[in-house]
Amino acid sequence: MSFLEEHLPVTSKAAPTLVNTADAARHIGLAEITLRVWRSEDNPHQPPYVRVGARGVRYDTAALDQWLKSRTHKPGSKSRRKDHGPGRQRGRPGPR
């Protein structure tokens, strides 16, 4: 079993389609810098990626699709968003 088969979900026997960061960002509708920052911060909620060489990074399009599907919320389901407390809005600093 190859490294990709072992670590990335492949839904078919065809070889995975690997894309660079810019193409992956377009594929899932995010800015390229978002994926770069998430990787540098080791964000646990980022899509899976493959290191290719010392600096190369590739994303499997099937894994990106699965990541998007796992983050899809249905109307009426409970939100996963944390409560920021009264008087605080997301993205705004709290009282000092």
Image (cartoon, rainbow, N blue to C red):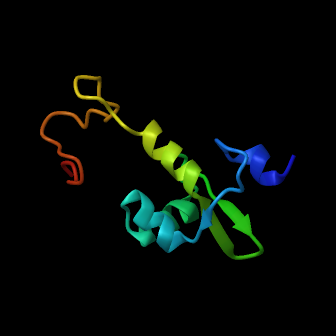
Residue 9's quadrant in the figure? top right
- Depicted 24 relative to depicted 43: above or below: below
Give how far across and how far down residue 48 sits, in percent.
60, 52
Q: Residue furthest left?
A: 87
- Depicted 40 relative to depicted 61: above or below: below
Q: Residue at x 37, y 37 (%)?
A: 72
In this rendering, position of residue 42 left or right of residue 80: right
Q: How many marks?
A: 0
**Closer to the camera in the image, 10 or 84:** 10
**Closer to the camera in the image, 10 or 24:** 10
In this rendering, position of residue 78 left or right of residue 1: left
**Whether residue 47 is visible:** no
**Closer to the camera in the image, 75 or 90:** 75
Q: Residue at x 76, y 53 (%)?
A: 4
Q: Residue furthest right?
A: 1
Give how far across and how far down residue 76 sits, in percent.
22, 23
Give how far across and how far down residue 54 sits, in percent.
76, 75
Q: Residue at x 41, y 66 (%)?
A: 26
Q: Residue at x 77, y 74 (%)?
A: 53
Residue 73's quadrant in the figure? top left
Residue 34's quadrant in the figure? bottom left
- Depicted 49 relative to depicted 9: above or below: below
In this rendering, position of residue 50 left or right of residue 71: right
Q: Residue furthest bottom?
A: 55
**Whether residue 41 is visible:** yes
In this rendering, position of residue 92 left or right of residue 67: left
Give how far across and how far down residue 11 sits, in percent.
64, 41
